[in-house]
Amino acid sequence: MATRTAVGLIIIIVGAMLFMSAWLYPQLPETVVSHWGANGAPNGMMPKFWGLFFLPLLTAGIVLLVFCLPYLDPLRKNIESFRSIYNTFVVGLALFLLYVHSLTLLWNTGTYFDMGRALLPALGVGMYGLGMMLRHTKRNWFIGIRTPWTLSSDRVWEKTHALGSTLFETVGALIVLSALFIEGRYYLWIILVPILAAAGAVVVYSYVLYGREKKS
């Protein structure tokens, strides 16, 4: 995806978030639910203004940051080789935050549901998208699996990201499927355990690969 196209889509996404918040603002009470626990039940409130506009503003800030990072990287040329895929991932991140914002607004208008179960498919798709991006990522200082060993060797970087891509795609698929079968009290575990296991595996794998490379 071209950078201009990605920027245009993100402006539309953030604009849609702001519009929905402004449209619903007069209809909502002075405090709104803004946080849910691991079991999907609400456990936090915010003043209406921040409850409706914090996430759109945060989305704009996050997107601005991730778009600027490649321009600060000494290995920017490597990022440019997969920039279209990176742009697509950033747009996907903005869409995920739009989805979260929509769920928050829907809940506060009186439509109650299991927030954890509603979020799981989107989180799974996000993890799968991360895995797809990792498959194409070249060595740089900001994006990807950045351990001392991947940053020290192109070969270690490529092999570690090939494994990481497969692992995170698998984690994403598992999280999506878990929304059909897992009870609310297990939501946190079904998210954290696979992600931490995948992250730990690629760190150890990069260390082992680098050690073998040094010996050879």
Image: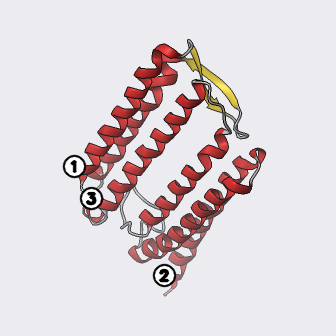
Q: Nearer the viewer, residue 44 or 162?
A: 44
Q: Nearer the viewer, residue 143 or 128?
A: 128
> Could you tell me if residue 214 is visible in this image?
yes
CA gap between label 2 and label 3 equals 26 Å
Looking at the rendered structure, the secondary structure element under dot 1 is helix
Which residue is identified by label 3?
76
Q: Nearer the viewer, residue 159 or 191?
A: 191
Type of amino acid at the residue the image marks with label 2: Glu
Q: Which color scheme does this rendered protein use?
A: secondary structure
120 displayed left or right of 41: left
Residue 154, numbered circle? none
The quadrant in which residue 65 appears is: top left
Residue 141 x, y percent position in the rendering: 38, 57
The quadrant in which residue 203 appears is: bottom right
Image height of 205 relative to 58, above or below: below
Image height of 194 relative to 16, above or below: below
Q: How many marks?
A: 3
Residue 69 x, y percent position in the rendering: 33, 48
Type of amino acid at the residue the image marks with label 1: Arg
122 displayed left or right of 144: right
The quarter of the picture where the N terminus appears is bottom left
Which residue is identified by label 2?
213
Identify the residue shown where x is 37% and y is 27%.
19
Residue 4, numbered circle? 1
Image height of 106 relative to 203, above or below: above
N-terminal of the two: label 3 or label 1?
1
Q: Are the residues tagged 3 and 1 within 8 Å (C-beta)? A: no
Q: Nearer the viewer, mark 2 or mark 3?
A: 3
Image height of 104 relative to 94, above or below: above
